[in-house]
Image: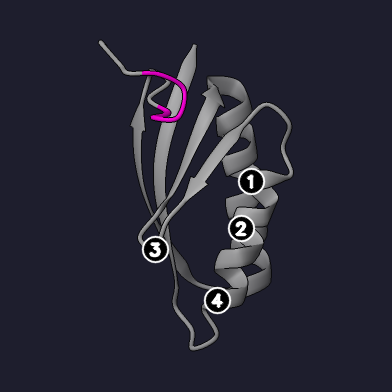
Amino acid sequence: MKLSVEISNYPLNEDYIVPIKDFIERLKATDGLRISCNTMSTQIFGDYDVVMDVLSQAMKYSFEHFGKMIFVCKFINADLDPVLKPHDD
């Protein structure tokens, strides 16, 4: 099954850029995922199991190494990457 996720990360400390960049780099290091970033969110596209595994690991690492933060996520069970094709889903 394919999965698309839109995720926003809000670290609850003054030095918020480092945790956000680290989180995105962890996602980008995973083979089989396509990542699209903008100023408001990061979008992740790929196989359900791969996406969920990397999100679980990256979020846990962020909590353990950077402290309190908020993750706001939207999930849809389809590949909605606009770079690939128009979607008729």
Residue labelled with disc 3: 39
Question: Closer to the observer: label 3 or label 4?
Answer: 3
Task: Describe the element under mark 1 as helix, strand or loop.
Answer: helix
Q: Are marks 3 and 1 in contact (CB under 8 Å)?
A: no
Between disc 3 and disc 1, whose residue precedes? 1
Q: Amino acid at mark 2?
A: Phe
Q: Are marks 3 and 4 in contact (CB under 8 Å)?
A: no
Residue 80, image quadrant:
top left
Q: Are marks 1 and 2 in contact (CB under 8 Å)?
A: yes
Task: Describe the element under mark 4 as helix, strand or loop.
Answer: helix
Residue labelled with disc 2: 23
Crowd rating for badge 2 (residues with CA inside 10 Å; few <14, some 14–19, many 20+): some
**Residue 14: x and y, percent?**
49, 88
**Residue 78: x and y, percent?**
38, 18
**50 or 41: which is nearer to us?**
41
Range shown magenta: 81-85
Residue labelled with disc 1: 27
Residue at figure coordinates x 74%, y 44% from the top left? 29
Crowd rating for badge 4 (residues with CA inside 10 Å; few <14, some 14–19, many 20+): few
